[in-house]
Amino acid sequence: MQTVLVTGGTGYIGSHTSVELIESGYKVVIADNLSNSQIEVLDGIKEITGVRPDFEKFDLCEREKVFSLFKKYRIDAIIHFAALKAVGESVEKPLEYYYNNIVTLINLLQAMKKYNTSSFVFSSSCTVYGQPDQLPVNENAPVKKAMSPYGNTKQIAEEIIQDTIHVTPLMKAISLRYFNPIGAHKSAEIGELPLGIPQNLVPFVTQTVAGIRNKLSVFGNDYNTPDGTPIRDYIYVCDLAKAHVVAVKRMLNNENKQNFEVFNLGTGNGISVLEIIKTFENATGKKINYEIVGRREGDIEKVWADTSFANKELGWKSDTPLDETLKSAWEWEKRIRNIK
Ligand code: UD1
């Protein structure tokens, strides 16, 4: 059995990916400091798969502990999710973001080199494209100056990985640029658990309907889009998780075409904020209390993915309908709030 180290494996995307890995026959070792996730997520993974992944609680900034982990397990591949990810917070605390997101990466790459682990999957973001000049945006679009320290850590990380691979023939990596991951596992055993007030749209929607938030603020309806609200490419988290398994397999089976590859993970569909609201209401029968307010600083107008490269090269496609995805988010919210 091949072993995959999933850093940040108790987090939102990490937990869904751990499920898909286990269901595809991999042994999963999770490393997480639980700074933005809870240990009970392991119970959810066990409930779905019948397997409780090995779990190591520590901070990947601690180099010696990273090396001890590689000594303890024979790791075949790494999927690196562990990172700070709040855009606004990163503007307030740039050094925390640079330190965390970059030091953890360097420690992992050094340990990979020392222990001859070949394959690395990196959790990147469509934020590297900024506001693209052409839509849908493909992987060859220029990387634009980051709008936040968070976004900059993703750009810098991709460069560090590329430079390392360039001089380390045994190593290869795939950077997956996510568009907007939403939804929860259909079992409602795992899902997104934001600490405090959600910054992202869909958790804010589900918490508003659950009565935890008063009202959803729609940040601006004066954009140059058909209904005036910003457009994103919302992708079901389980579809996204499956792409990670494909990426790991591709490298472990030596099917990668280059030692460093980049793929967009999106659906190819651009959806506005008002369309999310309408689709959620139709899918769940629940009304969302919302009001239009001013724009949120740093938001771009519109972005959606050209997925043709990922579809063709990875033989992967995100095809879960948006209404099903939004319903899964609501089922998860109901479950954790004990709503019937
Ligand atoms: C951004 C980044 C993404 C990053 C993510 C991390 C881009 C294109 N995407 O996602 O790479 O990983 O942050 O958090 O830069 N909205 C509201 N009301 C709310 C919340 C959101 O109207 O209460 C709107 C936003 O204005 C936006 C859309 O909903 O148009 C999605 O917002 P959000 O879920 O925060 O994701 P992004 O900002 O697109």
Image (cartoon, helix red, strand yellow):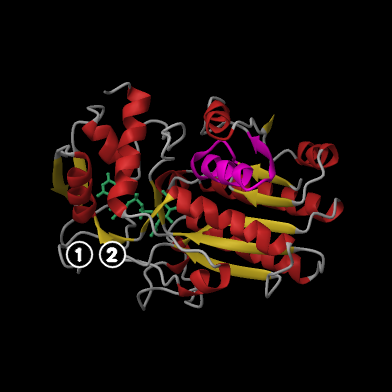
- Can residue 223 be seen at all in this image of the molecule? yes
Q: Quadrant of residue 299?
A: bottom left
Check disc 2: other Cα within 10 Å, few if <14, some if 14-19, many if 20+: some
Q: Is mark 1 within 8 Å of ligand 1?
A: no
Rendered residue at 30%/66% (across/down): 302
Residue 103: x percent and y percent? 68, 48
Q: Which residues are magenta?
A: 8-32
Tell whether 339 sits left or right of 96: left
Amino acid at pointer 2? Glu
Res 301 label:
2
User: Which residue is identified by label 1?
Assistant: 223
Rendered residue at 60%/31% (across/down): 50
Q: Is mark 2 within 8 Å of ligand 1?
A: no
Rendered residue at 52%/29% (across/down): 44
Q: Classify the position of the C terminus by image quarter.
A: top left
Say if mark 1 contacts mark 2, CB within 8 Å. Answer: yes
Q: Between disc 1 and disc 2, whose residue precedes?
A: 1
* 28 in magenta: yes
Residue 143: x percent and y percent? 50, 71
Q: Nearer the viewer, residue 166 or 272?
A: 272
Q: Nearer the viewer, residue 303 or 310?
A: 310
* 321 in magenta: no
Amino acid at pointer 1? Tyr
